[in-house]
Amino acid sequence: MITLILPNLSENLQAILPEISLALTLVAIVLFDLIFIKSKKFLPLISIIGLIVTFSFVILQFGDPKYAFAVSGNLSFLSLDNFSAFFKLLILITTLFIVLFSMSSQEVNSCPDRHGEYYALILGMVIGMFFMVSANDLILIYLSLELLSLSSYVLAGFVKTSIRNSEASLKYIIYGSASSGIMLFGISILYGISGSTNLHEINSILQSPTANQLTFLMSILMIFAGIGFKISIVPFHFWTPDVYEGAPISITAFLSVASKAAGFAVLIRFLKITFAQGLDKSGYWQMLSYIDWQMLLISFSIITMTFGNFAALWQDNLKRMLAYSSIAHAGYLMLGVAVLSDQGLMAVLVYFSIYLFMNLGAFYVVMLIANKINSEEIDDYKGLGYSLPLLGTALGIFLVSLTGLPPTAGFIGKLYLFIALVDANMITVAIIALLNTVVSLYYYIRVLKAMFLDKTDKKVEINLSPLNYIVLLLLIAPVLILGVYFTPLVNIAKESVQLLGF
């Protein structure tokens, strides 16, 4: 294998320039932190420069699909296609916002001596995500998932003086290690059945069924459990509310978007490359007959969105409420995957692009208010809409968009999801998703009621910095603009749905 890869080593290294750029940025942060101990304020700037350089490398790869570290033909470790490039761009945009969030976070700034580790771990997570979204091999998927997970375990407990941070980190690592072990066991069983860890090779082997059906089903469910943990679907969601509530808000926002995006990218590639054997005349994927994938995915998505929405109804902590909301959104996204077509995949990409801005925006406003009032309880938000009109209006826009109401971008995300469901003749499922959206309206409106309708004698004043205004504008603008002008986003999503080698 090494002799086959070495002759094309320079070409392979050029194919992973974004990952190399991130790794060099990580090294630069560590070295700068060691040498210039009293100049921590430059660490975010170094991170931003590295992310922008990586962004340019990813843009250059868009539209030029290729394999990297190929052993033979399409048997490669990495697929550098438009699909992976799209998710890498989402991850980079999210990371840029998280670095900007961190500069204003009291939780992060309360530990100035460990800022080097903080930004290095964030970049470690991003490197893991980048390899995840491109991986064609189960071993590489697992290794990149572990790189992502180990970094996130530490970041969840970054503020050592906070008991709830330590609790979040401990719960996260316990659940995470259990899910990783189950996933690795599933991979070992699948390897025993097929004799390979390459997704393309497993697909060709499974075309002529010789494996024990029960053993195969068990291995797939174990792998699915590991991926399900990352995307927070029921019943693999137990870590989500506690970790989201306990971790620093900037890390909670990062996990809710970037980590979930990487998880969905892995799930989609795993399904389509491993178990799809072609397209029927109407453009839907023809899956191998081992498992009724559509029914399995629909069941998981309906249970996830229903549980997430109804559990959110009872939450008094805003971060915890947004955690259950995130679980519900994972259920909506899973419906797009369950359609098993490029139309459904396009709906997932559009939804994720919009979810990025509205979810990060909600967490950002919560962070700015928590910096001042030191609370995330909904009862403490009473009357804040009048004393903080800008932040109150911004949070209202983000919550309305998360509900999926026009004229915000959240409506467009749900619209394309419902179009994909109706085209696939999944009318009943679309109605269930619509009813779930009605349920979500209640707990989002509850926050707005506390801010604008409940009276209080307390007056809260927050002095926003120019950076705060810029970040708010950068988050609000896409939510409003994409609600009325979304054609470019849809076109990019259409170009990105084709997975290399299928």
Image (cartoon, rainbow, N blue to C red):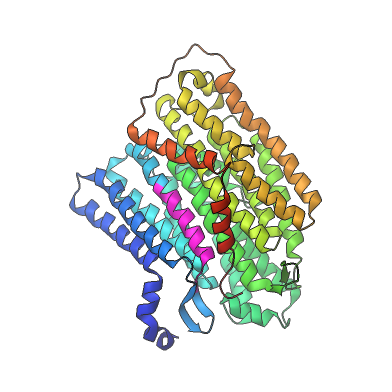
Is any part of residue 159 visible from this angle? Answer: no
- Residue 367: which quarter of the image? top left
**Is 406 above or below relative to 278?**
above
Residue 126 is situated, as x and y percent measured from the top left of the image, at 42, 57
Question: What residue span does the magenta drawing correspond to?
Answer: 78-96
- Determine the residue positioned at 19% across, 44% down: 38
Residue 316 is situated, as x and y percent measured from the top left of the image, at 59, 29
**Is 334 above or below relative to 318?**
below
Residue 439 is situated, as x and y percent measured from the top left of the image, at 71, 36
- Determine the residue positioned at 39% across, 40% down: 101
Horizontal side of 204 relative to 243 (left or right) equals right
Residue 214 is situated, as x and y percent measured from the top left of the image, at 74, 72
User: Is 90 within the magenta?
Assistant: yes
Residue 477 or 467: which is nearer the viewer?
477
Horizontal side of 85 relative to 217 (left or right) equals left
- Determine the residue positioned at 52% across, 31% down: 395
Q: Main secondary structure of the magenta part?
A: helix
| Quadrant showing the N terminus | bottom left
Residue 316 or 458: which is nearer the viewer?
458
